[in-house]
């Protein structure tokens, strides 16, 4: 940092979100730089995937971080992490950007999403027809489409941020629908290693994506949750 | 069947989470541990909320990944922010500094100001720092903030250009780099464009910083095909644009490709303004 380096290296790694935001609110540029270095990559990856435009994404990320500088004192760590706060700001800015540009997630994007959804739940890629209901949603509720697309973008960024060996087990489990035993066989890893890496990956994803995933309807895998909540 | 406690319930939930369909199969499972878990969930809102959170995460992951590892891997390729973004954000924040400072309370000013104005020297003692900050507030806040803003802007400009210079260094270090002249519509030299396999740098001193609602926007054009690739940044008298070529894997530069700069409203996605600067990328 350029203005005196008030924060030591240990500070920069140890600072939790609440203290970091408090220092930013007090005008400490060095704290702001730590927040940028810590979170800009994730926010940028999410916005760039959502907009499909890296330059526009850079402008949105800039807006989000300037907002952090202006409003850091409004951050409340009890409501979520600084990353999810930044992502919420970026999401609004990105959707505003789509509106201002007269764009919305395109028909092609919707089609891709439909294929993705089928594939993700174990369906066949051989039938990429878009469900009529999804097209109707797109026509009547672009915000719903945009919200789903945003969640996908953030989740993909979260998976991309996992360590290689944890990312592999998630890809094979969710994209190829392999069991833990099949993943172990495919990767020639002990079954226990596959399980521990899957657990770590899921914990990391929940930590970084939890509030974002709340935007998602828990389709398919919801039965257990509903079984409990209905009782 | 024995009653399941929280610890055993969480253990079972963790086990079910290992398979994407694990939670989905809970409702119909006849396994004794799943019957016990369902019974526990029915009476335990905490565990139920935890399970619902996990179900949402699983659903979100399933929805985000296409149905083959190769396709899924393509959707999660790393996307790094452009190297110039950090300097841009810092420059924008520094431009905000007087406003942010004005919103601080006197006590916050006393705490924050000596830190931000490090070039004034760190206070030797806390009371001296407090006194200095109060003096700034009382007699000289406007002038000092203006001076601080100017210094910060110059510092930001130097850092921004430093990134451009570093990118040029990387380009020149690559054997297969290219350099072409950037010209005005009148055909006079106005700067340069240089690029390698990974970096792209445009430098010119022929542009004046536009108004806040306008941008000098960069385009790659081939015949009727035009794509917006970025906007020029300004550091004092120099305008520059630094980018990563890796982002344009789908664009092939050939003998007819033009690099064009035009003045556009901020955020414009199609070119409507006249060409201000241009370069024939196949001419080097």
Image: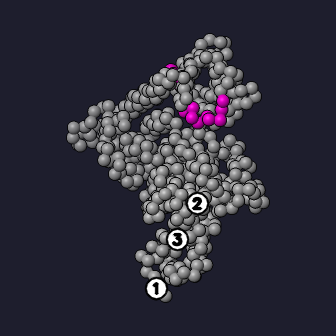
* Residue position for label 2: A174
Please give the chain letter of the residue carrying mark 3.
B
Task: Where is residue B262? Give x, y as percent.
Answer: 65, 25
For the point 55% across and 29% down, which residue is it?
Answer: B197
How many residues crowd around disc 2 within 10 Å: few (fewer than 14), some, or many (20 or more)?
many
Residue B7 drawn at (x, y percent): 42, 76
Question: Quick one: label 1, few (<14), some, or many (20+) residues within 10 Å?
Answer: few
**Figure check: A172 above or below B234:** below
Residue position marked by numbered label 1 in the rendering: B3
**Disc with the residue nearer the chain's start (1 vs 3):** 1
| Residue stretch rendered in magenta on the structure | B236-252
Q: Mark 3 points at which residue?
A: B16
- Residue placed at 71% from the left, 43% from the top? A102
Quarter of image, res B204: top right
Q: Distance between the residues labelled 2 and 3?
A: 14 Å
Q: In this view, does B223 lie to the left or right of B125?
A: right
Label 1: element kind = loop
Check the residue under mark 1 and report the chain it is in: B
């Amino acid at each position: 940092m350029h203005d005196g380096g008030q924060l030591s290296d240990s500070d920069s790694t140890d600072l939790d979100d609440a203290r970091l935001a408090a220092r930013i609110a007090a005008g400490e540029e060095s704290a702001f730089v730590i927040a940028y270095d810590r979170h800009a990559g994730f926010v940028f990856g999410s916005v760039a995937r959502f907009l499909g435009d890296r330059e526009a994404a850079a402008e949105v990320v800039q807006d989000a971080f300037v907002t952090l500088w202006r409003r850091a004192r409004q951050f409340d760590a009890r409501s979520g992490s600084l990353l999810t706060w930044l992502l919420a700001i970026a999401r609004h800015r990105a959707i505003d950007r789509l509106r201002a540009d007269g764009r919305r997630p395109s028909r092609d994007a919707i089609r891709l999403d439909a294929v993705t959804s089928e594939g993700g739940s174990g369906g066949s890629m051989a039938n990429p027809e878009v469900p009529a209901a999804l097209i109707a949603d797109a026509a009547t509720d672009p915000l719903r489409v945009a919200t789903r697309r945003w969640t996908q973008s953030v989740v993909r960024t979260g998976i991309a941020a996992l360590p290689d060996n944890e990312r592999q087990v998630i890809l094979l489990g969710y994209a190829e629908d392999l069991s833990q035993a099949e993943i172990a066989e495919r990767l020639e890893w002990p079954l226990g290693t596959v399980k521990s890496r899957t657990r770590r990956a899921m914990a990391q994803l929940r930590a970084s994506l939890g509030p974002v995933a709340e935007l998602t309807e828990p389709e398919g895998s919801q039965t257990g949750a509903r079984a409990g909540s209905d009782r | 069947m024995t009653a399941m406690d929280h610890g055993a319930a969480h253990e079972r939930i963790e086990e079910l989470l290992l398979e994407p369909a694990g939670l989905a199969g809970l409702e119909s499972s006849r396994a004794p541990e799943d019957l016990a878990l369902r019974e526990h969930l029915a009476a335990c809102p905490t565990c139920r909320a935890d399970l619902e959170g996990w179900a949402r995460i699983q659903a979100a992951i399933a929805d985000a990944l296409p149905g083959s590892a190769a396709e899924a891997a393509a959707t999660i390729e790393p996307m790094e922010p452009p190297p110039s973004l950090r300097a841009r954000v810092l420059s924008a924040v520094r431009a905000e500094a007087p406003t942010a400072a004005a919103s601080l309370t006197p006590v916050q000013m006393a705490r924050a100001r000596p830190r931000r104005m490090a070039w004034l020297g760190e206070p030797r003692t806390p009371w001296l720092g407090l006194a200095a900050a109060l003096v700034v507030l009382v007699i000289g806040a406007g002038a000092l903030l203006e001076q601080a803003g100017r210094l910060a802007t110059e510092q930001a400009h130097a850092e921004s250009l430093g990134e451009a210079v570093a990118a040029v260094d990387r380009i020149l270090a690559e054997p297969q780099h290219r350099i072409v002249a950037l010209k005005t519509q009148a055909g006079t030299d106005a700067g340069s464009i240089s690029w390698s396999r990974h970096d792209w740098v445009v430098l010119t001193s022929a542009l004046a910083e536009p108004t806040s609602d306008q941008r000098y926007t960069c385009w790659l054009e081939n015949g009727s095909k035009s794509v917006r690739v970025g906007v020029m940044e300004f550091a004092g008298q120099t305008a520059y644009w630094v980018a990563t070529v890796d982002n344009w894997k789908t664009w092939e530069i050939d003998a007819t490709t033009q690099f064009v700069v035009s003045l556009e409203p901020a955020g414009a996605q199609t070119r409507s303004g006249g060409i201000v600067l241009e370069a024939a990328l196949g001419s080097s």
